[in-house]
Amino acid sequence: MSKWMFSILLFLPFGIMGCVGLQGKSGAEILPSRLSWLQDTPIEEIASSRLTCDTHPEIVDGNLETVGTFEVQGAVEKKHVIVQRETGFYGKNQYVTDLGGTIRGEILVKLEEPMYVSIVEVYPASRISNLALSTALEDSERHFGQSGTGFKPVHDKQYRDVEGTKPVKFEVGRELLYLRVTADTMADRQNATRFDDRVSDEGIDIPLKGASIREIKLYGRQPLYGKTEK
């Protein structure tokens, strides 16, 4: 028998044994090896062409010069009111603050398909109050509840106040389809106006303004044979 034929015969039993061994393993046993392979792949930026934002496309266009601003759906009013006492004819004069609408603004970013995201970077263009991220993997999660309660919060740096324009990095470490970015709107005191509140002329209307973001970048582990496009 030739050496070449002997090598083939020697290889076949080991090949068959290997296949039999894999067939006997469950998916849970094979999964760790798949995760290990994923951990060995490099973290790369997910191309902006794979991200969409219907309300603020400029924050995912790959251009740090463009800016998107949170939409405002509220206003603050400071005024005097008469709080009637339980007894007597005279009420008590109190200065109160009323909020109309909501103080939170949100921006929703969608990936072209579910992807594993390791890190999210937010590039602010202004001060951001109580910045927070949350994610959803399916459309059903996104529409769960009137306030978007189906979104899972990203606990890293949750409700952080951001000063300056340096990028803020969030550790995410999960697969997602939607990324929701929320922040408090801020009082625009420079454009406040006074009005007669029927008790005094010291009533004040304070408009709200949204924080601004230059760009949102996502980074994930990409297969070595399928690197993200630039």
Image (spheres, rainbow, N blue to C red):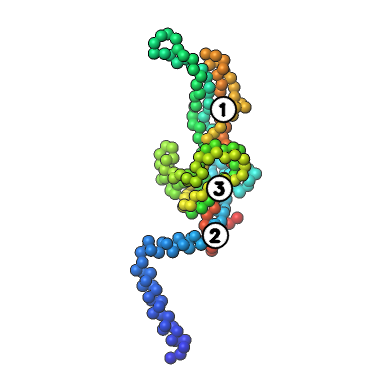
Residue 180 at x, y percent in the picture: 49, 43
Residue 133 at x, y percent in the picture: 50, 43
Which residue sits at x=53%, y=51%? Answer: 119
Amino acid carrying label 3: it is Lys
Amino acid carrying label 1: it is Pro
The image shows a total of numbered marks equal to 3
Residue 12 at x, y percent in the picture: 40, 80
* Sequence order check, earlier mark of 2 and 3: 2
Q: Is residue 175 left or right of residue 164?
A: left
**Mark sitting on residue 169:** 3
Residue 52 at x, y percent in the picture: 54, 47
Q: Secondary structure at mark 3?
A: strand
Locate residue 56: give its quadrant: top right
Q: Are marks 2 and 3 in contact (CB under 8 Å)?
A: no
Residue at which label 2 appears: 42
Q: Nearer the viewer, mark 1 or mark 2?
A: 2
Which residue sits at x=59%, y=42%? Answer: 124
Extreme residue in the bottom direction: 1
Extreme residue in the left direction: 24
Amino acid carrying label 2: it is Pro
Residue at which label 1 appears: 207
Which residue sits at x=52%, y=57%? Answer: 221
Category of crowding for the residue at label 1, using alpha-carbon neighbours closer than 10 angstroms: few (below 14), some (14–19), many (at least 20) = some
In this view, 108 is above or below 24: above
Image quadrant in which the C terminus is located: bottom right
